[in-house]
Image (cartoon, helix red, strand yellow):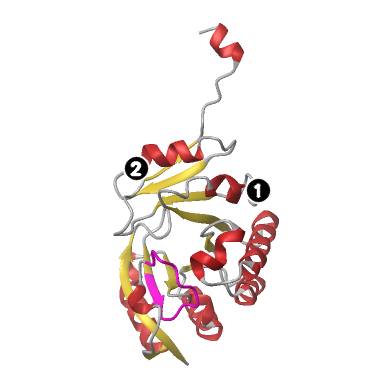
């Protein structure tokens, strides 16, 4: 089987929290986000046999405990993704994907066939802004989110997190997005980096998420990833301080 291949990183400690993983990039993505970090593999064709990609994984095997498939958009190539996850599992490796959620049926198949351990789902903006920011309808992403929540809460999916890349001027988005998420689903708000926009600092991201009544994982280039939860100050606390 062939895969439209975008690249391979033999060792990463930032793409799956708590694991050292290899990262496989699939080429091609239907979204057109202005801040895309991998625009060179958003389009084009570069077909590679799955067997060749697995050779890279085997070489990295002594140093990793899992594999993350990213993109582009990995779920746009369902058959190649299924085979790759299945064979990585046979190598004793945990499997994860980073996805924009545009292909819910692929995500359903991964979960239903028990081929996936970790899903990082990008929630790029509020549902009403999806067409303008990505060029795509939000309906498929909503369906993917619903399936991930159900699978995570029922125990069929071991790990899942929603991820929002936050840019200056869009700080209020996280409050709307968070209303779609149960408190037990990890929510990552990461620093958006784009040449045309000054990145938010960690302190500014903390200010954006402070109104939320849930914990949030904040991720920046400067501070890495850490958990933030606003400390509620009540009248009782003030009187007794």
Q: Position of residue 32 (x, y in %)?
A: 45, 72
Identify which residue, 27 or 58, lies in the foreground: 27
**Quadrant housing residue 65:** bottom left
Q: Position of residue 228 (x, y in %)?
A: 47, 37
Residue at the (65%, 52%) spot, across then down: 180
- Label 2 residue SS: loop
Disc ID at residue 68: none
Disc ID at residue 201: 2
Residue position marked by numbered label 1 in the rendering: 182
Q: Main secondary structure of the magenta part?
A: loop
Q: Which residues are magenta?
A: 23-36
Residue at the (45%, 36%) spot, across then down: 207
Q: Is disc 1 in contact with disc 2, using a CB cutoff of under 8 Å? A: no
Residue 217 included in the magenta stretch of the image: no
Identify which residue, 139 or 103, lies in the foreground: 139
Q: How far is disc 1 from disc 2 in space, using C-alphas? A: 26 Å
User: Where is 196 relative to 9, above or below?
Assistant: above
User: Where is 71 relative to 47, above or below?
Assistant: above
């Amino acid at each position: 089987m062939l895969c439209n291949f975008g690249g391979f990183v033999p060792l990463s400690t930032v793409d799956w929290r708590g694991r050292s993983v290899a990262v496989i990039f699939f080429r091609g993505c239907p979204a057109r986000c202005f801040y895309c970090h991998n625009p060179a593999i958003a389009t084009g064709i570069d077909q590679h046999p799955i067997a060749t990609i697995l050779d890279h994984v085997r070489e990295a095997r002594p140093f990793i405990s899992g594999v993350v498939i990213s993109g582009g958009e990995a779920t746009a190539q369902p058959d190649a993704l299924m085979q790759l996850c299945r064979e990585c599992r046979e190598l004793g490796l945990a499997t994860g994907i980073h996805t924009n959620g545009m292909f819910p049926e692929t995500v359903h198949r991964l979960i239903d066939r028990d081929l996936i351990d970790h899903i990082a789902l990008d929630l790029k903006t509020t549902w009403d802004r999806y067409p303008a920011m990505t060029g795509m309808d939000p309906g498929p992403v909503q369906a993917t989110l619903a399936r991930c929540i159900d699978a995570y809460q029922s125990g069929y999916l071991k790990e899942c997190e929603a991820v929002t890349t936050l840019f200056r001027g869009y700080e209020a988005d996280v409050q709307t997005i968070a209303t779609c998420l149960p408190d037990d689903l990890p929510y990552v708000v990461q620093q958006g980096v784009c040449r045309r926009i000054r990145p938010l600092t960690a302190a500014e991201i903390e200010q954006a998420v402070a109104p939320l009544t849930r914990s949030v994982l904040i991720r920046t280039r400067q501070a890495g990833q850490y958990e933030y939860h606003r400390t509620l100050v009540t009248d009782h606390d003030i009187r007794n301080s």
